[in-house]
Amino acid sequence: MNIVILAVGKLKEKYLQDGIKEYKKRLKPFCHLDIIEVAEEKVPETLSDAEKQRVLKKEGERILEKLTPSSFVIPLCVEGERYSSKQMAQKMSDLMVSGISHITFVIGGTLGLSDEVKARGHLKLSFSTFTFPHQLMRLIFVEQLYRWFKIIRGEPYHR
């Protein structure tokens, strides 16, 4: 299984880098994981709706350029479907059994994802109605990805 995390912005905090590095190491027996970063637009403290749309459009264009046509795309967005860890593990298992071998998860920037990126998704996924910092979301996501694979294999991590 090839998994890509396509994320807006550069990960700056060392503690987040270290956490992600640890989970990438743990994920090696289960999948090949790549993390691709696209440039983040500067977002002023106060911005108009037009400025917000401009930022989302620019970041969205960068994301869409990096998506491979054969990949099953899952944008992470608040309006997406919510699953328990066990349900998402089953969803991942179903995708693998159906022949899907390349999945791209997309994590937006400060303002989220453009409508065009969401529309490109085969499945929209929501982790919560809470808002998480997009950089922290990367760490949360890789931990969940590891958890899903452990559940799929029937191993005890998820308990």
Image (spheres, rainbow, N blue to C red):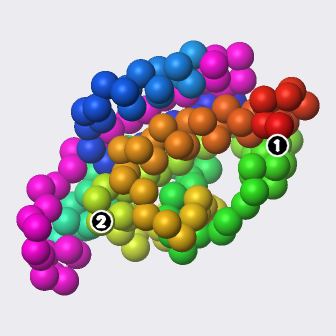
The residue lying at 73 percent from left, 61 percent from top is 83
23 above or below 36?
above
State yes or no: residue 2 in magenta.
Answer: no
Magenta-highlighted residues:
26-53
**Could you tell me residue 110's position as x and y percent?**
28, 59
Mark 2 or 1, closer to the camera: 2
**Residue in view at x 37 percent, y 51 percent:** 134
Amino acid found under the numbered disc labelled 2: Leu
Identified at 45% across, 47% down, the residue is 137
Q: Quick one: label 2 or label 1, which is nearer the N terminus?
A: 1
Question: Dot 2 corresponds to which residue?
Answer: 111
Quadrant (top left, top right, bottom left, bottom right) of the N terminus: top right
Labels 2 & 1 near each other (Cβ < 8 A): no
Q: Which residue is mark 1?
A: 93
> Could you tell me residue 79's position as x and y percent?
54, 74
Residue 92 against residue 152 in the figure, above or below: below
Answer yes or no: is residue 63 visible. Answer: no
Pointer 2: residues within 10 angstroms few (<14), some, or many (20+)? Answer: some
The 10 Å Cα crowd at callout 1, few under 14, some 14 to 19, many 20 or more, is some
Q: Amino acid at mark 1?
A: Ser
With respect to residue 64, does 118 lie above or below?
below
- Camera-nearest residue between 66 and 152: 152
Task: Tell me the element at label 2.
Answer: loop
Relative depth, front residue between 56 and 137: 137
